[in-house]
Amino acid sequence: MKRESIINLIKDWRVALLLVLVIGSLAGIYLAPLNLQKGLEGNLQFGLDLEGGSWLQMEFQSVVVGYSTDKPVGDLIENLQKSLDADVVQIDTDHLEIRKSVSRADLEPMFAASGAEIVTYHEGVSPYTADDVKRILNKKVNALGMQDAKINLLTPTGSEYPQYVRIELAGVDMATAQGIVGKQGMFEIRIQTTANRTEHVLYGDQITSVGVPQKDPYTQMWGVGFTLSDAGARAFRDAASEHGALADPRAHHLVMLLDNETVYSAPLDGNLVSELRSGPVRSLSATTGSGDAGLEDAMTLEIHLRAGALPVKVGIVGSGSVPAALGEHFKTMVALAGVLALLTVGAVVYYRYREPSIVIPMLAITFSEIVILLGIARFAQQLDLASIAGLIAVLGTGIDQLVIVTDEVLHEGRVPSPNLYMKRYGRAFGIIAVAAATVIIAMLPLVLMDLSTLRGFAIITILGTMVGILVTRPAYGKIIMAILSK
Protein backbone atom coordinates (compact mmCIF):
# COMPACT_ATOMS: atom_id res chain seq x y z
CA MET A 1 0.00 0.00 0.00
CA LYS A 2 1.14 3.54 -0.72
CA ARG A 3 1.93 6.05 2.01
CA GLU A 4 -1.15 8.12 1.15
CA SER A 5 -3.40 5.08 1.45
CA ILE A 6 -1.90 4.20 4.85
CA ILE A 7 -2.45 7.77 6.11
CA ASN A 8 -6.08 7.72 4.94
CA LEU A 9 -6.56 4.35 6.61
CA ILE A 10 -5.18 5.64 9.93
CA LYS A 11 -7.52 8.65 9.74
CA ASP A 12 -10.54 6.35 9.69
CA TRP A 13 -12.15 6.51 13.15
CA ARG A 14 -12.30 2.72 13.52
CA VAL A 15 -8.57 2.25 12.91
CA ALA A 16 -7.72 5.38 14.90
CA LEU A 17 -9.71 4.10 17.90
CA LEU A 18 -7.85 0.78 17.73
CA LEU A 19 -4.46 2.53 17.68
CA VAL A 20 -5.41 4.84 20.57
CA LEU A 21 -6.54 1.91 22.73
CA VAL A 22 -3.38 -0.09 21.96
CA ILE A 23 -1.14 2.87 22.83
CA GLY A 24 -3.19 3.62 25.95
CA SER A 25 -3.01 -0.02 27.05
CA LEU A 26 0.77 -0.12 26.61
CA ALA A 27 1.06 3.12 28.58
CA GLY A 28 -1.08 1.68 31.36
CA ILE A 29 1.01 -1.48 31.52
CA TYR A 30 4.45 0.16 31.40
CA LEU A 31 4.11 3.86 32.21
CA ALA A 32 1.39 4.21 34.88
CA PRO A 33 3.46 4.30 37.01
CA LEU A 34 6.79 3.86 35.28
CA ASN A 35 8.18 0.43 36.12
CA LEU A 36 11.50 -0.47 34.54
CA GLN A 37 12.35 -3.41 36.78
CA LYS A 38 9.65 -5.90 35.87
CA GLY A 39 10.53 -6.19 32.19
CA LEU A 40 7.74 -7.45 29.97
CA GLU A 41 5.41 -7.87 32.96
CA GLY A 42 5.19 -4.13 33.55
CA ASN A 43 2.46 -3.22 36.03
CA LEU A 44 0.27 -6.26 35.39
CA GLN A 45 -1.21 -7.73 38.57
CA PHE A 46 -0.76 -11.49 38.79
CA GLY A 47 -2.80 -13.83 40.95
CA LEU A 48 -1.81 -16.50 43.42
CA ASP A 49 -1.10 -19.05 40.65
CA LEU A 50 1.51 -16.88 38.91
CA GLU A 51 2.90 -14.71 41.71
CA GLY A 52 3.02 -17.13 44.62
CA GLY A 53 1.28 -16.44 47.91
CA SER A 54 -1.19 -17.95 50.35
CA TRP A 55 -4.86 -18.86 50.60
CA LEU A 56 -7.14 -19.51 53.54
CA GLN A 57 -10.56 -21.12 53.60
CA MET A 58 -12.53 -20.32 56.75
CA GLU A 59 -15.80 -21.67 58.09
CA PHE A 60 -18.30 -19.39 59.80
CA GLN A 61 -18.89 -20.42 63.42
CA SER A 62 -22.60 -19.74 63.17
CA VAL A 63 -25.95 -21.34 62.38
CA VAL A 64 -29.19 -20.05 60.87
CA VAL A 65 -32.34 -21.46 62.46
CA GLY A 66 -35.91 -21.26 61.21
CA TYR A 67 -38.39 -21.30 64.07
CA SER A 68 -42.05 -21.05 65.00
CA THR A 69 -43.43 -19.66 68.27
CA ASP A 70 -46.54 -18.06 69.73
CA LYS A 71 -44.55 -16.14 72.35
CA PRO A 72 -42.58 -12.88 71.99
CA VAL A 73 -39.48 -13.32 69.84
CA GLY A 74 -37.53 -10.95 72.09
CA ASP A 75 -37.84 -13.36 75.00
CA LEU A 76 -36.57 -16.22 72.83
CA ILE A 77 -33.57 -14.19 71.68
CA GLU A 78 -32.74 -13.07 75.22
CA ASN A 79 -32.92 -16.64 76.57
CA LEU A 80 -30.69 -17.94 73.76
CA GLN A 81 -28.12 -15.21 74.34
CA LYS A 82 -27.94 -16.02 78.05
CA SER A 83 -27.80 -19.79 77.53
CA LEU A 84 -25.22 -19.72 74.73
CA ASP A 85 -23.27 -16.59 75.68
CA ALA A 86 -23.40 -15.57 72.01
CA ASP A 87 -24.95 -12.92 69.79
CA VAL A 88 -28.35 -13.86 68.33
CA VAL A 89 -29.64 -11.74 65.44
CA GLN A 90 -33.13 -11.86 63.93
CA ILE A 91 -32.79 -12.13 60.14
CA ASP A 92 -36.50 -12.00 59.28
CA THR A 93 -39.82 -12.87 60.87
CA ASP A 94 -39.03 -16.58 61.31
CA HIS A 95 -35.23 -16.96 61.10
CA LEU A 96 -32.50 -16.34 63.69
CA GLU A 97 -28.75 -16.19 63.17
CA ILE A 98 -26.96 -17.69 66.16
CA ARG A 99 -23.34 -16.58 66.04
CA LYS A 100 -21.87 -19.67 67.58
CA SER A 101 -21.24 -23.19 66.34
CA VAL A 102 -23.92 -25.25 68.08
CA SER A 103 -25.71 -28.43 67.03
CA ARG A 104 -29.44 -28.76 66.43
CA ALA A 105 -29.70 -31.33 69.22
CA ASP A 106 -28.28 -28.82 71.71
CA LEU A 107 -30.57 -26.03 70.49
CA GLU A 108 -33.87 -27.92 70.58
CA PRO A 109 -34.26 -28.00 74.40
CA MET A 110 -33.39 -24.28 74.57
CA PHE A 111 -36.08 -23.44 72.02
CA ALA A 112 -38.58 -25.71 73.79
CA ALA A 113 -37.89 -23.98 77.10
CA SER A 114 -38.82 -20.66 75.44
CA GLY A 115 -42.00 -22.08 73.87
CA ALA A 116 -40.52 -22.28 70.36
CA GLU A 117 -39.82 -25.04 67.86
CA ILE A 118 -36.99 -25.41 65.33
CA VAL A 119 -38.30 -25.71 61.76
CA THR A 120 -35.06 -25.55 59.75
CA TYR A 121 -31.37 -25.65 60.67
CA HIS A 122 -28.42 -24.60 58.47
CA GLU A 123 -24.77 -24.09 59.23
CA GLY A 124 -23.55 -20.71 58.00
CA VAL A 125 -24.59 -17.07 58.20
CA SER A 126 -27.18 -14.80 56.62
CA PRO A 127 -26.26 -13.18 53.28
CA TYR A 128 -26.04 -9.80 55.06
CA THR A 129 -23.51 -11.07 57.63
CA ALA A 130 -21.52 -12.79 54.87
CA ASP A 131 -21.34 -9.55 52.87
CA ASP A 132 -20.33 -7.75 56.07
CA VAL A 133 -17.43 -10.19 56.55
CA LYS A 134 -16.40 -9.70 52.93
CA ARG A 135 -16.42 -5.91 53.25
CA ILE A 136 -14.37 -6.02 56.47
CA LEU A 137 -11.75 -8.31 54.92
CA ASN A 138 -11.63 -6.11 51.82
CA LYS A 139 -10.97 -3.03 53.94
CA LYS A 140 -8.25 -4.82 55.90
CA VAL A 141 -6.56 -6.02 52.73
CA ASN A 142 -6.82 -2.62 51.04
CA ALA A 143 -5.37 -0.91 54.12
CA LEU A 144 -2.27 -3.08 53.69
CA GLY A 145 -1.92 -2.13 50.02
CA MET A 146 -3.04 -5.50 48.61
CA GLN A 147 -6.01 -4.40 46.52
CA ASP A 148 -5.84 -7.47 44.29
CA ALA A 149 -6.75 -10.03 46.93
CA LYS A 150 -9.59 -12.40 46.08
CA ILE A 151 -12.30 -12.85 48.69
CA ASN A 152 -15.09 -15.26 47.83
CA LEU A 153 -18.12 -16.52 49.74
CA LEU A 154 -18.90 -20.22 49.32
CA THR A 155 -22.41 -21.58 49.76
CA PRO A 156 -23.11 -25.34 49.95
CA THR A 157 -25.39 -26.85 47.31
CA GLY A 158 -29.04 -26.71 48.36
CA SER A 159 -28.48 -23.94 50.91
CA GLU A 160 -28.99 -20.18 50.68
CA TYR A 161 -26.66 -19.40 53.58
CA PRO A 162 -22.91 -18.96 52.95
CA GLN A 163 -20.85 -21.33 55.08
CA TYR A 164 -17.28 -20.54 54.04
CA VAL A 165 -15.16 -17.57 52.98
CA ARG A 166 -11.97 -18.02 50.95
CA ILE A 167 -9.27 -15.38 50.76
CA GLU A 168 -6.34 -15.49 48.31
CA LEU A 169 -3.39 -13.16 48.81
CA ALA A 170 -0.75 -13.07 46.08
CA GLY A 171 2.79 -12.44 47.29
CA VAL A 172 1.85 -12.88 50.99
CA ASP A 173 3.20 -15.57 53.32
CA MET A 174 0.92 -17.76 55.43
CA ALA A 175 1.65 -16.01 58.75
CA THR A 176 0.73 -12.61 57.30
CA ALA A 177 -2.43 -14.03 55.73
CA GLN A 178 -3.58 -15.42 59.08
CA GLY A 179 -2.71 -12.13 60.78
CA ILE A 180 -4.94 -10.20 58.39
CA VAL A 181 -7.95 -12.27 59.40
CA GLY A 182 -7.39 -11.81 63.14
CA LYS A 183 -6.10 -8.22 63.21
CA GLN A 184 -8.18 -5.56 64.95
CA GLY A 185 -7.55 -1.85 64.72
CA MET A 186 -7.31 0.68 67.57
CA PHE A 187 -10.75 2.28 67.84
CA GLU A 188 -11.12 5.40 69.98
CA ILE A 189 -13.89 7.90 70.78
CA ARG A 190 -12.83 11.46 71.57
CA ILE A 191 -14.77 14.63 72.29
CA GLN A 192 -14.05 18.10 70.89
CA THR A 193 -13.03 20.63 73.54
CA THR A 194 -11.99 23.91 71.89
CA ALA A 195 -11.27 24.64 68.21
CA ASN A 196 -9.76 21.47 66.73
CA ARG A 197 -8.59 20.00 70.03
CA THR A 198 -10.10 16.78 71.32
CA GLU A 199 -9.89 14.75 74.52
CA HIS A 200 -9.95 10.97 74.93
CA VAL A 201 -13.24 9.43 76.07
CA LEU A 202 -12.95 5.65 75.64
CA TYR A 203 -11.43 2.87 73.52
CA GLY A 204 -13.15 0.21 71.45
CA ASP A 205 -12.93 -2.40 74.20
CA GLN A 206 -15.70 -0.47 76.02
CA ILE A 207 -18.11 -1.18 73.12
CA THR A 208 -19.93 -4.39 74.02
CA SER A 209 -22.10 -4.83 70.90
CA VAL A 210 -22.73 -3.23 67.50
CA GLY A 211 -26.03 -3.37 65.64
CA VAL A 212 -26.75 -3.44 61.94
CA PRO A 213 -27.60 -0.24 60.00
CA GLN A 214 -31.21 0.83 60.60
CA LYS A 215 -33.39 3.57 59.07
CA ASP A 216 -35.37 5.81 61.41
CA PRO A 217 -39.02 5.55 60.26
CA TYR A 218 -39.70 9.20 61.13
CA THR A 219 -36.58 11.04 59.92
CA GLN A 220 -35.66 8.47 57.20
CA MET A 221 -32.05 8.78 58.37
CA TRP A 222 -29.70 5.82 58.52
CA GLY A 223 -27.70 5.06 61.63
CA VAL A 224 -25.82 2.39 63.54
CA GLY A 225 -26.62 1.51 67.15
CA PHE A 226 -23.99 0.34 69.60
CA THR A 227 -23.84 -0.44 73.31
CA LEU A 228 -21.25 0.65 75.86
CA SER A 229 -20.19 -1.18 78.98
CA ASP A 230 -21.16 0.34 82.34
CA ALA A 231 -17.67 1.80 82.72
CA GLY A 232 -17.76 3.12 79.16
CA ALA A 233 -21.17 4.74 79.69
CA ARG A 234 -19.91 6.51 82.82
CA ALA A 235 -16.75 7.69 81.05
CA PHE A 236 -18.83 8.98 78.15
CA ARG A 237 -21.17 10.98 80.40
CA ASP A 238 -18.32 12.38 82.51
CA ALA A 239 -16.45 13.56 79.40
CA ALA A 240 -19.56 15.14 77.87
CA SER A 241 -20.29 16.99 81.12
CA GLU A 242 -16.70 18.05 81.83
CA HIS A 243 -16.03 19.50 78.37
CA GLY A 244 -19.34 21.34 77.98
CA ALA A 245 -21.04 19.09 75.44
CA LEU A 246 -24.17 18.88 77.59
CA ALA A 247 -24.45 22.67 77.73
CA ASP A 248 -23.55 23.38 74.09
CA PRO A 249 -23.61 20.13 72.05
CA ARG A 250 -23.20 21.86 68.67
CA ALA A 251 -19.77 23.18 69.64
CA HIS A 252 -18.46 19.82 70.90
CA HIS A 253 -18.46 17.13 68.25
CA LEU A 254 -18.10 13.47 69.11
CA VAL A 255 -15.16 12.15 67.06
CA MET A 256 -14.51 8.47 66.30
CA LEU A 257 -11.08 7.33 65.13
CA LEU A 258 -9.75 4.03 63.80
CA ASP A 259 -5.96 3.77 63.89
CA ASN A 260 -5.81 7.56 64.42
CA GLU A 261 -7.89 8.32 61.32
CA THR A 262 -11.24 10.08 61.75
CA VAL A 263 -14.13 7.89 60.61
CA TYR A 264 -17.05 9.83 62.13
CA SER A 265 -17.63 13.30 63.56
CA ALA A 266 -20.96 14.85 64.61
CA PRO A 267 -22.49 16.81 67.50
CA LEU A 268 -24.52 15.04 70.20
CA ASP A 269 -28.23 14.58 69.48
CA GLY A 270 -30.62 16.70 71.57
CA ASN A 271 -32.49 13.69 72.96
CA LEU A 272 -29.21 12.04 73.94
CA VAL A 273 -28.11 15.22 75.73
CA SER A 274 -31.32 15.21 77.77
CA GLU A 275 -30.75 11.57 78.78
CA LEU A 276 -27.11 12.21 79.69
CA ARG A 277 -28.10 15.04 82.02
CA SER A 278 -30.02 12.45 84.04
CA GLY A 279 -27.32 9.79 84.07
CA PRO A 280 -25.09 7.44 82.04
CA VAL A 281 -26.51 6.04 78.77
CA ARG A 282 -25.33 2.69 77.45
CA SER A 283 -27.27 2.47 74.15
CA LEU A 284 -26.11 5.01 71.57
CA SER A 285 -26.70 5.51 67.86
CA ALA A 286 -24.57 7.31 65.26
CA THR A 287 -26.61 8.88 62.43
CA THR A 288 -24.98 8.92 58.99
CA GLY A 289 -27.57 10.50 56.67
CA SER A 290 -30.38 9.55 54.32
CA GLY A 291 -30.66 7.70 51.03
CA ASP A 292 -28.12 5.34 49.51
CA ALA A 293 -25.20 7.51 50.64
CA GLY A 294 -26.41 7.35 54.24
CA LEU A 295 -26.76 3.57 54.03
CA GLU A 296 -23.26 3.19 52.59
CA ASP A 297 -21.81 5.39 55.35
CA ALA A 298 -23.72 3.41 57.98
CA MET A 299 -22.37 0.12 56.66
CA THR A 300 -18.83 1.51 56.71
CA LEU A 301 -19.26 2.92 60.22
CA GLU A 302 -20.49 -0.47 61.44
CA ILE A 303 -17.16 -1.96 60.34
CA HIS A 304 -15.23 0.82 62.07
CA LEU A 305 -17.17 0.37 65.32
CA ARG A 306 -16.14 -3.25 65.30
CA ALA A 307 -12.53 -2.04 64.89
CA GLY A 308 -12.07 -4.47 62.03
CA ALA A 309 -13.29 -7.47 64.02
CA LEU A 310 -15.46 -9.91 62.09
CA PRO A 311 -19.10 -10.01 63.27
CA VAL A 312 -18.91 -13.79 63.57
CA LYS A 313 -16.00 -16.03 64.53
CA VAL A 314 -14.37 -18.07 61.79
CA GLY A 315 -12.32 -21.23 61.91
CA ILE A 316 -9.61 -22.04 59.38
CA VAL A 317 -10.56 -25.32 57.70
CA GLY A 318 -8.10 -25.19 54.81
CA SER A 319 -4.96 -23.33 53.81
CA GLY A 320 -2.14 -23.52 51.36
CA SER A 321 0.56 -21.59 49.60
CA VAL A 322 2.23 -21.38 46.21
CA PRO A 323 6.01 -20.76 46.37
CA ALA A 324 7.21 -17.73 44.40
CA ALA A 325 9.56 -19.95 42.36
CA LEU A 326 6.67 -22.15 41.27
CA GLY A 327 4.67 -19.06 40.38
CA GLU A 328 7.52 -17.83 38.15
CA HIS A 329 7.60 -21.24 36.47
CA PHE A 330 3.86 -21.07 35.80
CA LYS A 331 4.32 -17.55 34.42
CA THR A 332 6.98 -18.76 31.96
CA MET A 333 4.81 -21.67 30.84
CA VAL A 334 1.81 -19.39 30.35
CA ALA A 335 3.84 -16.97 28.23
CA LEU A 336 5.15 -19.86 26.15
CA ALA A 337 1.63 -21.24 25.69
CA GLY A 338 0.40 -17.84 24.48
CA VAL A 339 3.20 -17.47 21.94
CA LEU A 340 2.70 -21.02 20.65
CA ALA A 341 -1.05 -20.43 20.34
CA LEU A 342 -0.50 -17.27 18.30
CA LEU A 343 2.07 -18.98 16.01
CA THR A 344 -0.14 -22.03 15.53
CA VAL A 345 -3.12 -19.89 14.62
CA GLY A 346 -0.94 -17.93 12.18
CA ALA A 347 0.24 -21.14 10.50
CA VAL A 348 -3.30 -22.47 10.11
CA VAL A 349 -4.60 -19.19 8.69
CA TYR A 350 -1.69 -18.98 6.25
CA TYR A 351 -2.37 -22.55 5.11
CA ARG A 352 -5.97 -21.53 4.40
CA TYR A 353 -5.36 -18.30 2.46
CA ARG A 354 -1.72 -18.55 1.27
CA GLU A 355 -1.69 -14.76 1.22
CA PRO A 356 0.53 -12.79 3.67
CA SER A 357 -1.42 -9.58 3.04
CA ILE A 358 -4.43 -11.28 4.68
CA VAL A 359 -2.64 -13.30 7.38
CA ILE A 360 -0.50 -10.45 8.76
CA PRO A 361 -3.46 -8.08 9.42
CA MET A 362 -5.32 -10.97 11.07
CA LEU A 363 -2.48 -11.67 13.47
CA ALA A 364 -1.85 -7.98 14.08
CA ILE A 365 -5.51 -7.40 14.96
CA THR A 366 -5.52 -10.44 17.26
CA PHE A 367 -2.31 -9.32 18.97
CA SER A 368 -3.69 -5.79 19.44
CA GLU A 369 -6.84 -7.28 21.00
CA ILE A 370 -4.72 -9.16 23.55
CA VAL A 371 -2.77 -5.96 24.33
CA ILE A 372 -6.01 -4.02 24.91
CA LEU A 373 -7.32 -6.78 27.17
CA LEU A 374 -4.13 -6.77 29.21
CA GLY A 375 -4.38 -2.98 29.47
CA ILE A 376 -7.92 -3.30 30.87
CA ALA A 377 -6.90 -6.16 33.18
CA ARG A 378 -4.06 -4.02 34.56
CA PHE A 379 -6.74 -1.89 36.29
CA ALA A 380 -9.72 -4.24 36.58
CA GLN A 381 -8.71 -7.89 36.85
CA GLN A 382 -6.01 -9.95 38.48
CA LEU A 383 -4.34 -12.36 36.06
CA ASP A 384 -4.37 -15.98 37.20
CA LEU A 385 -4.34 -19.24 35.26
CA ALA A 386 -8.10 -19.03 34.60
CA SER A 387 -7.76 -15.48 33.25
CA ILE A 388 -4.89 -16.52 30.99
CA ALA A 389 -7.05 -19.37 29.70
CA GLY A 390 -9.67 -16.71 28.92
CA LEU A 391 -7.07 -14.75 26.92
CA ILE A 392 -6.19 -17.83 24.88
CA ALA A 393 -9.90 -18.55 24.31
CA VAL A 394 -10.39 -14.97 23.12
CA LEU A 395 -7.47 -15.43 20.74
CA GLY A 396 -9.07 -18.50 19.18
CA THR A 397 -12.62 -17.14 18.91
CA GLY A 398 -11.26 -13.84 17.58
CA ILE A 399 -9.50 -15.56 14.69
CA ASP A 400 -12.70 -17.51 13.98
CA GLN A 401 -14.62 -14.26 13.60
CA LEU A 402 -11.95 -12.69 11.39
CA VAL A 403 -12.08 -15.78 9.15
CA ILE A 404 -15.87 -15.38 8.90
CA VAL A 405 -15.43 -11.76 7.80
CA THR A 406 -12.69 -12.63 5.29
CA ASP A 407 -14.55 -15.59 3.79
CA GLU A 408 -17.73 -13.58 3.45
CA VAL A 409 -16.15 -10.65 1.62
CA LEU A 410 -14.07 -12.99 -0.59
CA HIS A 411 -17.09 -15.07 -1.61
CA GLU A 412 -16.44 -16.81 -4.94
CA GLY A 413 -12.74 -15.93 -4.60
CA ARG A 414 -13.06 -12.43 -5.99
CA VAL A 415 -12.77 -8.97 -4.43
CA PRO A 416 -16.24 -7.37 -4.59
CA SER A 417 -17.14 -3.80 -5.40
CA PRO A 418 -17.29 -1.36 -2.42
CA ASN A 419 -21.10 -1.52 -2.22
CA LEU A 420 -21.18 -5.30 -2.37
CA TYR A 421 -18.27 -5.44 0.07
CA MET A 422 -20.20 -3.43 2.68
CA LYS A 423 -23.25 -5.63 2.19
CA ARG A 424 -21.24 -8.81 2.71
CA TYR A 425 -19.33 -7.31 5.63
CA GLY A 426 -22.59 -6.30 7.28
CA ARG A 427 -23.87 -9.85 6.93
CA ALA A 428 -20.66 -11.27 8.44
CA PHE A 429 -20.74 -8.74 11.28
CA GLY A 430 -24.32 -9.76 12.07
CA ILE A 431 -23.24 -13.39 12.37
CA ILE A 432 -20.36 -12.65 14.76
CA ALA A 433 -22.50 -10.18 16.78
CA VAL A 434 -25.06 -12.91 17.47
CA ALA A 435 -22.26 -15.33 18.38
CA ALA A 436 -20.72 -12.72 20.70
CA ALA A 437 -24.05 -12.10 22.43
CA THR A 438 -24.40 -15.85 23.02
CA VAL A 439 -20.92 -16.00 24.60
CA ILE A 440 -21.65 -13.03 26.88
CA ILE A 441 -24.97 -14.49 28.05
CA ALA A 442 -23.32 -17.87 28.69
CA MET A 443 -20.51 -16.30 30.74
CA LEU A 444 -22.66 -13.94 32.84
CA PRO A 445 -23.67 -16.58 35.44
CA LEU A 446 -19.99 -17.35 36.08
CA VAL A 447 -19.30 -13.64 36.63
CA LEU A 448 -22.19 -13.22 39.06
CA MET A 449 -21.35 -16.36 41.03
CA ASP A 450 -18.45 -16.25 43.52
CA LEU A 451 -16.52 -19.09 41.91
CA SER A 452 -12.92 -18.01 42.33
CA THR A 453 -11.56 -20.51 39.80
CA LEU A 454 -13.92 -19.57 36.96
CA ARG A 455 -14.85 -15.94 37.49
CA GLY A 456 -11.61 -14.59 36.00
CA PHE A 457 -12.05 -16.75 32.90
CA ALA A 458 -15.60 -15.45 32.41
CA ILE A 459 -14.63 -11.79 32.94
CA ILE A 460 -11.75 -11.92 30.44
CA THR A 461 -13.90 -13.78 27.90
CA ILE A 462 -16.68 -11.18 28.14
CA LEU A 463 -14.23 -8.27 27.94
CA GLY A 464 -12.48 -9.84 24.95
CA THR A 465 -15.79 -10.40 23.17
CA MET A 466 -16.87 -6.79 23.74
CA VAL A 467 -13.51 -5.38 22.62
CA GLY A 468 -13.75 -7.51 19.49
CA ILE A 469 -17.27 -6.42 18.56
CA LEU A 470 -16.83 -2.74 19.42
CA VAL A 471 -13.22 -2.11 18.33
CA THR A 472 -11.16 -4.74 16.55
CA ARG A 473 -13.73 -6.27 14.14
CA PRO A 474 -14.79 -2.89 12.68
CA ALA A 475 -11.11 -1.90 12.37
CA TYR A 476 -10.27 -5.20 10.64
CA GLY A 477 -13.15 -4.73 8.22
CA LYS A 478 -11.75 -1.36 7.15
CA ILE A 479 -8.15 -2.61 6.95
CA ILE A 480 -8.94 -5.72 4.93
CA MET A 481 -11.10 -3.69 2.53
CA ALA A 482 -8.21 -1.29 1.88
CA ILE A 483 -5.80 -4.21 1.35
CA LEU A 484 -8.07 -6.23 -0.92
CA SER A 485 -8.95 -3.21 -3.04
CA LYS A 486 -5.26 -2.93 -4.01
Image (cartoon, helix red, strand yellow):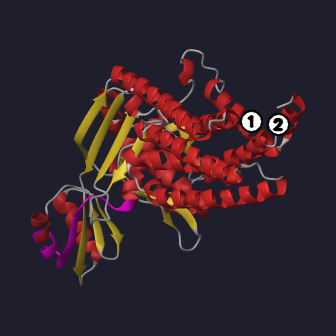
Instruction: Choose between 6 and 468: the one closer to the eye.
Output: 6
Left or right: where 308 falls relative to 349: left
Range covered by the magenta-colored residues = 109-127
Q: Amino acid at mark 2?
A: Ile
- Residue 10 is marked as 2
Q: Amino acid at mark 1?
A: Leu
* Residue 373 rendering spot, x and y as whole percentages: 59, 39
* Residue 47 rendering spot, x and y as whole percentages: 43, 34
Instruction: Choose between 289 and 103: the one closer to the eye.
Output: 103
Looking at this view, name the residue that lies furthest to the top. Answer: 37
Q: Secondary structure at mark 2?
A: helix
- Residue 388 is marked as none
Which quadrant is the N terminus positioned in?
Answer: top right
* Residue 299 rendering spot, x and y as whole percentages: 49, 54
Residue 233 within the magenta-colored segment of the rendering? no
Left or right: where 224 falls relative to 227: right
